Image: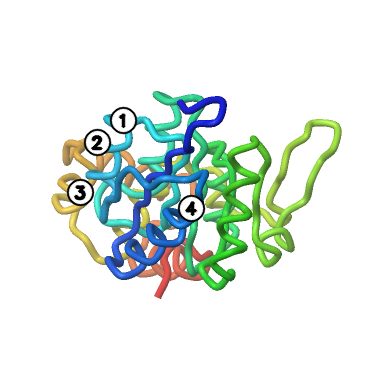
Amino acid sequence: MVANNEQQTVFLVDDCPLLLEALANNFNREPEFTVIGTASDSDDGFRKILDCAPDLVLCDVELPGRGAFTMAEEVLSRLPLLRLVFLTDYVTDVFLDQTLRVNATGYLLKTEHPSDIVKAVRSAMRGERCFSNDVLDRLDYHPASKRYMVRSTSYLSSLTNRQLEVLRHLTRGESVKEVARAMMLSERAIESHKYRIMQKLGIHDRVERARYAIREGLTVP
């Protein structure tokens, strides 16, 4: 990790090439930042982040591959000093719950002015949490524990991050085989997760399961 007066390194993950280019240009114009890599999916992002060990990762919540939250959880467990901030078009309680679970540093919306995104990243580099105002409206801060918590609760909060990712794939209409391939797990493991998801939610109908996931904001349009 970078220290002292060296440039602070940023890695970007988003499936929109134009946004990646625009973000890279914005950060590279700032004297204290340098973008050292980009990726367009969570699998490539996972490998490259471990390889280059940046100071901060800025990534979307909706990414092809193993999934943004799975990627975040895995890289943060291996690079504990890494700052990871989500930058997305969407804000839902389940996304925020996952953000707090993986101990990400922040959650920003793409509607923010580019200068405000850079300012928020500066705060993140100092170890401060950074959230857009619309995100803060959904959170409560507990001074005693110094922790943020999502105000509303959902049955989805009983699912693990991996189960949420499996449910996200299934809700998109993917088969067990397709989910297994995307998440690099065995079909047997996906079937096991699928069973536990339905048991926890008390939903055993595929259509109703999909409707519930969409209603709770697990998938985006």
Numbered circle sitting on residue 202: 4
Marks 2/3: CA–CA distance = 15 Å
Disc 3 to disc 1: CB gap under 8 Å: no
Query: As displayed, is residue 71 above or below residue 63?
Result: above
Numbered circle sitting on residue 216: none
Marks 3/1: CA–CA distance = 20 Å
The residue singled out by tag 2 in the image is 47
Task: Please tell me which of labels 4 and 3 falls first in the chain.
Answer: 3
Point 35% across, 52% down: residue: 13
SS class, disc 1: helix
SS class, disc 4: loop
Drawn side of residue 178 relative to residue 190, left or right: left
Point 65% across, 45% down: residue: 123
The residue singled out by tag 3 in the image is 182
> Number of marks in the image?
4
Three-letter amino acid code at the position of disc 1: Leu
Task: Please tell me which of labels 2 and 3 falls first in the chain.
Answer: 2
Point 57% across, 49% down: residue: 121
